[in-house]
Image: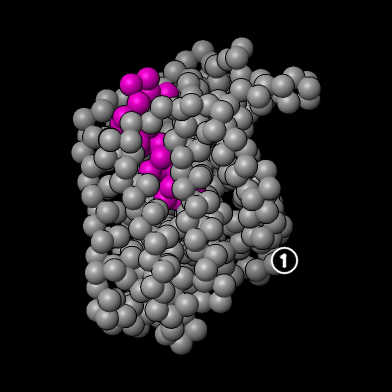
Amino acid sequence: MGLRMLRALRDPAVLVCASVAFILGMGFFMPTHAAWCDLFYVLAGPGILLALKRGGFDLNWRDPAVLLPVALIGWFTLTQAWCINPARRADLFYVQGFCCLVFFLGAVQALRQSGFAARLGRVLIAGGSLNALISIGFYPSRNGIGGRLGGIGETRQAILGASLIAVAALWAFWRASQPKRQNLKSSRGWYFAAGLLLTLFILLTQSRGPIAGFGAGLLLLIVAHRRRWRILALAMGFPAMLLWFDRGLRAFVWGAINDRGTSWRPEIWRASIASIKLHPWIGNGAGSLLGYNNFTFPHDLYLSLLFYSGMIGFALFVALVVLLFWRLCHRPGAERILLWALWANMLISGLTDYGQIIQSPSPLWYIVWLPIAYTVVYTTNPITPRLSEAVDTKDRAWPIPL
């Protein structure tokens, strides 16, 4: 089996798929962020580059859906040349920009392979569920009842961890909502159970922005699947019923959220806007520090775009979002609902957090770049990977056990 897998990696398509799935799967379990980065630098990154070199993958570089993300990463990386208030080792953002580009191109090429999107969904759901199970198990001893849950791996930071887990949770609920098929009857219940476990993780982090983003994405799934809304509505209805009938629990949850106040967000945003006004068009540079008290970045996706890359970078991002949304509206298929949910999670949770988008590797690879890459593939590839048709199917040409 091991020799067969190694021989299969000679195929560029298999190599790029295995590299992308490997780095995203291991992000749930690596003991430190540095260790996860080393995995990308030593194994996954070179694997993607080798696959791209050997594969001769054809991308239409004239298509703005392909060109805009590459231009956005390139512009962010270029802004490091005029970094105003550089952080320590800020020049590493040149490397990080390159790594982000490698991951994005690798994700696009992997998602173009038939059936890989379904397999990647299984990797994210399984990895996220095991991460949540371990994290919740240690929650009372590590955080104390009432404390904010911090997970393991790349979910150790409550806000980014909640948004990352939300990607897996939305994918799980989407899989649970699909029509009954012979190969799905035994797994829909497991996907729903995984979604509930991941939802519990998100709630225990007490991260308000990610909870709102996840709730918006889940609401889209419920509205889109009117005939099967019950199975998804339980995910929102069960916690709501508990809060409604249990006054003690309601007071505890409200107190845990309200006692944190605004978490300095208005002050951080005012400082960010003041810095943006100094360099509105080209930004302060990828490696710049905000320099407001101990806060180093704007804690808002949109202000971060303006702070680091100016109006040029912000315009590139807005153009990318508008283009992909327009194409998504005109592309039929069940997968479109999943993509809408992932975009809702990204754009709404980004209102209260997120900084530099070209960090590498980063939880933002799950939250931002994976939905972008999959939407690019879904709206441009003439042979779209059909998740609803590829779920749990056997592919004799696929030797990697994902």
Of residues 129 and 81, the one nearer the viewer is 81
Left or right of 323? Residue 9 is right
Residue 319 x %, y %: 23, 49
Image height of 142 relative to 170, above or below: below
Residue 291 x %, y %: 44, 83
Image height of 141 relative to 337, above or below: below
Q: The N terminus is located in which quarter?
A: top right
Residue 392 x %, y %: 55, 21
User: Please, what is the dominant secondary structure of the magenta stretch?
Assistant: helix
**Residue at 59 percent of width and 70 percent of height:** 147
Image height of 365 relative to 173, above or below: below
**Residue at 43 percent of width and 80 percent of height:** 85
- For the magenta stretch, what is the residue range? 365-385
Residue wearing tag 1: 141
**Residue at 41 percent of width and 69 percent of height:** 81
Q: Amino acid at mark 1?
A: Ser
Q: The C terminus is located in which quarter?
A: top right
> Which residue, as the protein is rendered here, is positioned at the far bottom?
293
Residue 27 x %, y %: 62, 49
Q: How many marks?
A: 1
Residue 354 in view here:
no
Image height of 401 relative to 31, above or below: above
Q: Quadrant of residue 211?
A: bottom left
Q: Quadrant of residue 311?
A: bottom left
Residue 142 in view here:
yes
**Magenta stretch: residue 379 in it?**
yes
For numbered disc 1, what is the local secondary structure? Answer: helix
